[in-house]
Image (cartoon, grey):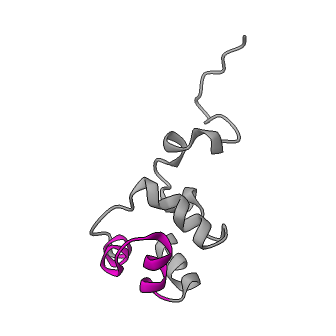
Amino acid sequence: MNAINKAIEIAGSASALAREIGVSTQAICFYRDGKRRLPVEKCSAIERATKGAVTRQELRPDDWAQIWPELVTSPPPNAEVVHG
């Protein structure tokens, strides 16, 4: 199950999730069906709405570390470590 479907299930329905994060039900369905990419600004809203059961990292697996670098707990495998 992908992260959006998990969030919908937790919220109870696509319309319930839409109300929680301030978008239309159609928008949630577009995100679920891959017709639109979930906007960055809605990821933390979903994380809050699901009480952390669906994380920003799950919602944006390809680019979350660039968007929210403060969530990175260790450097990527090929990262250059700068000693100060």
Left or right: 48 as drawn, with respect to 13: right
Q: Which of 81 and 52 is in front in this view?
A: 52
Does 16 lie within the magenta span? yes
Does 57 lie within the magenta span? no
Please tell me whether the stretch drawn in magenta is mainly helix, strand or loop: helix
Q: Residue at x 39, y 57 (%)?
A: 39
The quadrant in which residue 24 appears is bottom left
Q: How many labels does the image show?
A: 0
Q: Nearer the viewer, residue 58 or 46?
A: 46
The quadrant in which residue 11 appears is bottom right
Look at the image and give the residue range highlighted in magenta.
Answer: 13-32
Left or right: 61 as drawn, with respect to 34: right
Q: Which residue is drawn at 35% across and 81% down?
A: 25
Give residue 15's position: percent from left, percent from top.
42, 85
Give residue 73's position: percent from left, percent from top.
70, 41
77 in relation to 42, above or below: above
23 in relation to 37, above or below: below
32 in relation to 70, above or below: below
Q: Which residue is drawn at 47% across and 73% down?
A: 4
Q: Which residue is drawn at 38% across and 71% down?
A: 23
Q: Nearer the viewer, residue 1 or 70?
A: 70
Give residue 69's position: percent from left, percent from top.
58, 39
For the C terminus, which image quadrant? top right
Outermost residue, bottom side: 12
